Image: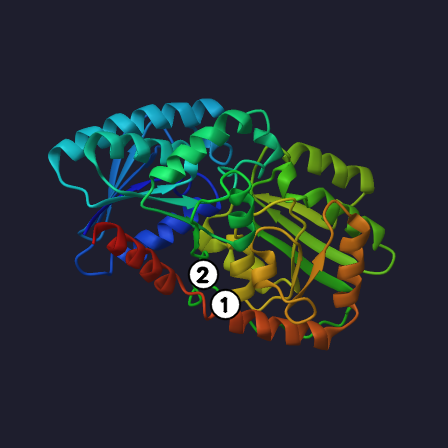
Amino acid sequence: MKILFLNYEYPPLGGGAANATAYLLDEFSRMSGVEVNLITSSIDSQYHRECIGEHIVIHRLPIGKNAKSLHFQSVKDLFVYTWKSYRFAKALLKKEKIDVAQAFFTVPCGLVAWKLHREFRVPYVVSLRGSDVPGYSDRFDFLYPFIRPIARAIWRGAAAVVSNSQGLKDLAHKTSLQQEIGIIHNGVDTEHFFPKQKASLEDLNTLHLTLGASRLTDRKGIRYLIEAIHLLKEEYTFMLKVIGEGNAKARLEQLVSEYGLESQVTFVGRIPREETLRYYQEADMFVLPSLNEGMSNAMLEALSCGLPIITTRTGGAEELVQEGENGLLIRKRDAKDVARALRMLAQDVALRERMGEKSRALAESMSWKNIAQQYAEVYKKTTA
C-alpha cells in the first residue's frame, strides 16, 4: 500500500500533530507492504529529502520558516504550504500511483487532499487535530466563518474522517452534524516514557510540576498555573520548569516576575522530544490548565511516566483522566481551582502514588503500534 501523508508540521517544526506523525511513520517503517511519502515543511529555505528505513520518504518544502518561528504557524505559512504541497503532490502523483492520502488537519492539508482527489481520484482520510475544527481556538475565530463551509466540503468528500478525541468529535459535529467521524486516539511510546523511582525528600513541602513540552500560547492556560503557584507559596514550594517556545512566553515571564517567582518557575526553552523524559521523571505531578486540546501528547507522556494528572475538562482529558482515580479535573480559567487540586495532591503522597500507578496502566494500553494498526485498518477500508 502506498500512502501520501500531508502535514505542514513535522519535528522539529510544530507540536502534537508533528510528533504523532513522526511516531506513526516510525511504526509504518516496520510494517511490510507499506510505503509512505510525507510532504511537510522545511525549517529553512531549502528542500530536504529524508528517509526512514527503505520505504518512508520525507519531503521538506521551504515555506519561509526559520529557527525563530518553528512553533507558531502564521496564516501566510499555511497558504504557502497549501500551494507548494499541492504542486509537489501533483508532480509525485504523475510519477507513481498512490493508494490513499492521509491529511493531518482539515486545513490546509485536507484542502490539498480534496483537490488531489478531484483531479486524480485518490481517496483521502482526514485526521482532526484541534485548531482545524471551527470553534477550537480563539486565535482563529476570525477565520472560522470562512473555514466552516470549506471544512464541510472536505469532510464530505473524504473516505473517512477521524478525530483524536471524543471532545473534538463533538465540536466537529457542531459544524457538520451528519458527518460520520471515527476516533483514533494519539498513542504514547511506553518504552521511552516510563516511571522512575523517586528518592524520598526531606522537604515534603517542595514539589516539582511539569506541563511537558508545550507551545507557549494563551490557549494552554499556563498563566493560571503560575497564579496558583503564587496563591500557594506560603504553604508549598512548587518548582516548575516550562518547556517550549511561543508567542505567550514574554507575557508569562512578566507574570512570573510580578509575582516574584523567579526561583520557582524556570523557562528552559525548546527541548528535543527525546530529551523530555527527565523532566517527567523528576516531577511529582503533571498540570495542564488548557483552554482547549485535541488529545494532548504531553498528557499521554505524563501518564506513561506514572504521574497523577491535573487538567481541565477539554479535548480528550475526560477519556484519559478519571476523577479521583488517576487525576483531578479542574475548571478553565480558574487559578483558585488549580490551587485546590495542587493542594489536594501535595498533602497526600499515598494518593499521588496510587494515581501514578493507574496512569501508567492506562498508558500501556495506548502504544503507537496499536494506533498505527488502527490507521492501517482505515486505509485498507478506503481502498477495498
What amino acid is at disc 2?
Val
The label on residue 147 is none
Callout 1: SS: helix
Residue 327 left/right relative to 29: right
Residue 147 left/right relative to 337: left
Comparing 9 with 1, the one in front is 1
- Is 367 rendered above or below residue 334? below
Can you identify the residue that label 2 sits on?
188
Image location of residue 199, percent across then percent down: 64, 73
The structure residue drawn at horizontal position 81% and vertical position 60%, both measured from the top left corner, is: 236
Image location of residue 279, percent across then percent down: 57, 57
Location of the C terminus (image quadrant): bottom left
Please tell me in which quadrant of the rendered image residue 246 appears. top right
The structure residue drawn at horizontal position 52% and vertical position 74%, both measured from the top left corner, is: 361
Q: CA distance from mark 1 to mark 2?
A: 7 Å
Comparing 294 with 196, the one in front is 294
Can you identify the residue that label 1 sits on?
363
Residue, far right = 234
- Is 354 rendered above or below residue 25? below
Please tell me in which quadrant of the rendered image residue 244 appears. top right
Residue, far left = 95
Residue 335 left/right relative to 216: right
Please tell me how crowded label 2 is: few (under 14), some (14-19), or many (20+) other residues with Cα within 10 Å: many
* Number of numbered discs on residues: 2
Please tell me how crowded label 1 is: few (under 14), some (14-19), or many (20+) other residues with Cα within 10 Å: many
Comparing 56 with 113, the one in front is 113
Please tell me in which quadrant of the rendered image residue 204 appears. bottom right
Residue 96 can be seen, yes or no: yes
Image location of residue 32, percent across then percent down: 18, 61
Residue 246 left/right relative to 34: right
What amino acid is at disc 1?
Ala
- Is 35 rendered above or below residue 122? below
